[in-house]
Image: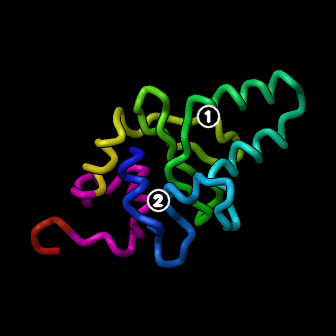
Amino acid sequence: MIRWVSSFSLLAKADETVWFLSRDDYSTGAAGAFAWNEYEQLSLQAATTDDEAAAVSRFWTRHLPLLLSVRNGYEYLAVRDDGAVVHGAEPEFEEAVIVFSHFEDLLTHIISWPARLDHVIDGLLFDSISIPHTRPGH
């Protein structure tokens, strides 16, 4: 994944409401409206007990954000420490679900789009109005 995030400086939708984090984004000196760990920070601020804050920290220790979205609320993709890609959203960022078993599967899905038009990734990356008709006669 390090090689991949080092291969671009900006990879975002044209309206910049959805973007992949680049190597520069993980730098503490990178300027921008959102920090790479913005959703972790929001969850820590919302924690009302030390136990909740500890649970948030444990979650984010195992998950590295890869993509952030502010288009339809706050959402993200993260790579878990075992290589799985998870999707999470507000208000409970830590209630993430696995969307791919491996990071490479995410890249394969993006390359082969529109193979699965109902996938959560398509909702994040591709506007539904731009999905071409794939059935004969449409």
Q: Is residue 80 above or below residue 93?
A: above
Residue 68 sits inside the magenta stretch: no
Residue drawn at the location 55% of the way across and 50% of the way down: 76
Q: Is residue 6 above or below residue 89?
A: below
Residue drawn at the location 41% of the way across and 64% of the way down: 8
In the picture of the structure, the residue carrying the numbered disc 1 is: 95
The residue type indicated by label 1 comes to: Glu
Q: Position of residue 41 (x, y in %)?
A: 75, 45
Start-end of magenta stretch: 111-133
Position of the N terminus by quadrant: top left
Q: Position of residue 88 (x, y in %)?
A: 57, 43
The outermost residue toward the left is 136
The residue type indicated by label 2 comes to: Leu
In the picture of the structure, the residue carrying the numbered disc 2 is: 124
Residue 130 sits inside the magenta stretch: yes
Q: Position of residue 42 (x, y in %)?
A: 77, 47
Residue drawn at the location 67% of the way across and 67% of the way down: 32
Q: Nearer the viewer, residue 64 or 138?
A: 64
Position of the C terminus by quadrant: bottom left
* SS label for mark 1: loop
Q: Is residue 138 above or below residue 87?
A: below
Q: Residues within 10 Å of mark 1 (few under 14, many from 20)?
A: few
Relative to residue 136, is residue 8 drawn left or right? Answer: right
Q: Residues within 10 Å of mark 2 (few under 14, many from 20)?
A: many
